[in-house]
Image (tube, rainbow, N blue to C red):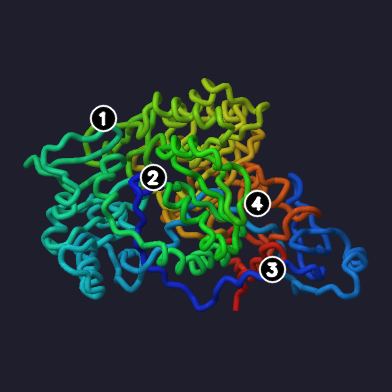
Amino acid sequence: MMMGYRIAQFTLAGALVLGAAAVAQARPTQEVPTLWHGGTILTMDGETPRTVQAVVTRGGKIVFTGTQKQARRVAGRNAQTRNLKGATLLPGFIDAHSHFALALQAAGGIDLSDPANGEVRNIPTLLTAVKRAAEQRGIAKGDWVVVWGYDQENLDEARHITRAEIDAVLPDHKVALLHVSFHGLIANSAALAAAGLKDGAPVPEGGVMTSGPDGKLTGLLFERAMYPVAGLMPRPDQQGMLAAIEAAQLRYAREGYTQMQEGASQPNDIAFFTSPAAKQRLKLDLAMLPVFTGLDPLLADKTVQFGTWQGRVKLQGIKFILDGSPQARTAYFTRDYARGAPDGSHPWHGQPVTSEAEFLTTARKAHQRGWQLFVHANGDAAIDMAIKTFDTLGITAAGNRRPVVIHSQFMRPDQIPQYKRIGVGPAYFSNHTYYWGDVHRTNFPDEVVGYISPLKASKQAGLIPSNHTDYPVTRLDTRMMLWTAMARTSKTGVVSGADQRIGAYEALQALTTGPAWQAFEENRRGRIKPGLLADFVVLEKNPLTTPVTGIRDIKVLETVKEGQTVWKAE
């Protein structure tokens, strides 16, 4: 869901509270074979579950799968032996979409979800938490107070806070409350003044900026309207980023991920992550999606390589943003929101963030260069834009270009066969059924909400979908993702689209073989098969035999990258 803050080229400062464990230091690849046995080894190789008794790895790759007797013969008498003791071994999980750069933040931001900030249940408690945190951190007058995790739907008032309300408690700081979708923010008067935004200013095309009855800006800035404020926010320097890499990787490794994604990369991100200092610190693989606003410099640089690993970093494809966020009511639909625009005005069905002409022009440049297209589209009208542009560019499944439509949330059934014809890989976001399913039902009828992230329909149509957290929009929790894909149950217990529920194996595919295919990595990772990377996750229980109600409670015991343990539970 994240978009505006990355295009504006700033990085959110957020406090990371991590345990003492750390990602293992890089070690030379061991040539001594390792034999894994003693548990359920689910290979994910095929459309139906397949298990083997043992796996042998050597030199960072899988060299054998099969019976334990044959494995011992292949491994030899000097092999290391890893007894799973009844646990389940799976291919390492692959991050289909998140924002790794936001996991590299220095202290300074105020996270409303942090229990240390107290319970935030309404606007007064929110303001108290922000003021108290700013005082405890000693943020000087005139400096920035950046707050994240703000969601008006979680407040008793169920409305946006206003600039005037923030001014009443922090008039001498520049304050920005970043919306949980990262598609907008609420700014106080000092922040608006710093960005040069004055009352009566015109609303930028592709943006949402509201004024009250008195003609004064309310502080609500969404999509392109947020860029002037977002671009001024503080960001850590290179040393601060380098210092945070190990802890950031830990967040992913302890969830079983062996490949991460930076899903909206700016030029400074590319320069940083491809620097020798950063590459030296990466223990997990990182796929990057440069944002289309920086496309021309990339095209002019003849040394740029896409689809090729440089150490543990790969430029995967170009990221385009067509609309906003459904929970922020800025996603682009063919039908109106029942609750209207973010300011409550009617009628409102959202709007494109990027015009159809701009999208086609920039997408054509990337496509002609042979670069993969990744397109953020949430509402069905934005998905129509993506389909139309793919068709104009002549993209078909036979061409094997594999465009990915990130989120693909509010699809219509008629769009599924069009994805199949074009060869689109939908990167779904099933967590929405839990976190915002109740909110979406206040805007759209049940049949629309029930088709959020239609994993079942996509699988039946022969598509290869993936599933993601969009971290930090939702928690980096792989078992939560499995559960939301299987249960599709909201916070209040309401099911959104029971007919789109999938089983555990299909949910695991969306974390392994699905994202591997979407990233042209199916011959390197995503399955336990000879010749592929020895990337594994060890789970306490087998998801295939665990009741749906227990899926969220399954523990990750260990994460292995190319034969080396990078995280292990104490």
Q: Nearer the viewer, mark 2 or mark 4?
A: 2
User: Looking at the image, do the residues carrying marks 3 and 1 touch, with CB atoms under 8 Å apart?
Assistant: no
The amino acid type of the residue labelled 3 equals Gln
- Residue wearing tag 3: 564
Residue 546 % position (x, y) = 66, 62
Mark 3 or mark 4, which has the lower sequence index? 4
Q: Give the crowd class for mark 3: few <14, some 14-19, many >=20 residues within 10 Å.
A: many
Is 91 or 294 nearer to us in this picture?
Answer: 294
- Find disc 4 in the rendering and name its residue: 512
Q: Name the residue nearer the viewer: 96 or 267.
A: 267
Hey, what amino acid is under mark 1? Pro
- The residue sitting at 34% across, 52% down in the picture is 10
Callout in the foreground (3, 2): 3
Mark 3 lies on a secondary structure that is strand
Q: Residue at x 16, y 58 (%)?
A: 166
Where is residue 448? Give x, y as percent: 44, 35
| Residue type, mark 2 in image | Met
Query: Measuring 73% from the left and 60% from the top, which residue is drawn there?
Result: 534
Spatial distance from mark 3 to mark 1, Cα to Cα? Answer: 56 Å
Q: Is residue 387 left or right of residue 5?
A: right
Label 2 crowd (10 A; few <14 / some 14-19 / many >=20): many
Three-letter code for the amino acid on which mark 4 is drawn: Thr
Q: Which residue appears at 24% of the width and 49% of the height?
A: 229
Q: Is residue 561 left or right of residue 175?
A: right
Q: Which residue is mark 1?
A: 347
Residue 211 figure quarter: top left
As drawn, 393 above or below 209: above
Q: CA distance from mark 2 to mark 1?
A: 24 Å
Q: Which residue is mark 2?
A: 3
Q: Residues within 10 Å of mark 1 (few under 14, many from 20)?
A: few
Helix, strand or loop for disc 4: loop
